Image: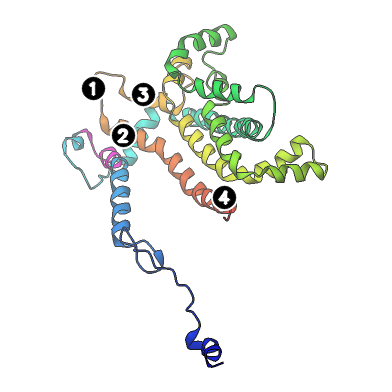
Amino acid sequence: MSATLQRATPEASPRPYQPRRRKLRFGAGAGNRPGFLLYGLLGAFVLATAYPLWWSFVVGSGTNATRGETLPMLPGGNFLSNAAIVLDAIPFWKALGNSLIVSCVITLSVVTFSTLAGYAFAKLRFRGRDGLMVFVIATMAIPTQLGIIPLFMVMRQLGWTGELGAVIVPMLVTAFGVFFMRQYLVDVIPDELIEAARVDGAGQFRTFLTVAVPAARPAMAILGLFTFMMAWTDYLWPLIVLNPGNPTLQTALGQLQSGYYIDYSIVLTGAVMATIPLLILFVVAGKQLISGIMQGAVKG
């Protein structure tokens, strides 16, 4: 009887299990927050990646003699005058408009078609699905330069040389975009959710709009951002298929260094001016990208 009472006392009850706290690494502080070491590494990385743009701005705001300095740090006062020279030397505004048209159309098309194809490869069952996916991935191993000559011959036969359509049409869909969206949608959309939508009477396209698109928004934002960057900075194909009177921004900047004497302050001023739209895009789309990722996160 005494033994039974002793077991019932609070002193004899076992202590609740308390997991051991893991040691924090990389300088993390209390509450698993990043510590000084991690912030220091991130700060060094940001400075290392931002310095080339800052150096371009410094040289572009000076004269051609400024580039003789090993590590220029302070900008000069000639950026606006150099920008005026750039605007007079090349058709800047027309090239800017062409680049915006090309980049926006390509981005919208790649995101749309890649999401549709990725959803089909990830969740639909049809004959030859795996073989077609292997074929799409295999095309990524072929260098783009190998297709430039036959592609130019096709554009010349169609009469599209010198037109923006010759730059847009070959890039309306990419193998990387299809592969990227397929890999994302395979795990993020449960098959049971698609079956539930079909039981409720939703058709194939309505299921795609109501189930796949909301789940794919984070991946669509990332793919759109990288596609816009790729189309904006493309130089080789627009240089070949477009004429100097109807250029994109990158090919127009190439006209600044076509002579024997190259004024690098003017060239870098044009490079900084061409980078400003990308910086604005990152600032505007950064919060939307993060919010889309947070909305699409799946709790485990």
**Residue at the (65%, 32%) spot, across then down:** 116
Residue sticking out furthest to the left: 69
Residue 149 among those drawn in magenta: no
Quadrant assignment, res 270: top left
The answer to whether residue 118 is left or right of residue 78 is right
Q: Which mark is residue 211?
A: none
How packed is label 4: few (under 14 Cα within 10 Å), some, or many (20 or more)? many
Asked if 142 appears above or below 37 in the picture, the reply is above
Q: Which mark is residue 292?
A: 4
Q: Which residue is mark 2?
A: 268
Q: Earlier in the sequence, mark 2 or mark 3?
A: 3
Distance, label 1 to label 3, CA atoms, is: 14 Å
**Residue at the (65%, 21%) spot, across then down:** 128
**Residue at the (26%, 28%) spot, across then down:** 263
Q: Which residue is mark 3?
A: 254
Look at the numbered disc 4 and give the secondary structure of its residue: helix
**Residue 12 vs residue 276, the one in the foreground:** 12
Q: Earlier in the sequence, mark 4 or mark 2?
A: 2
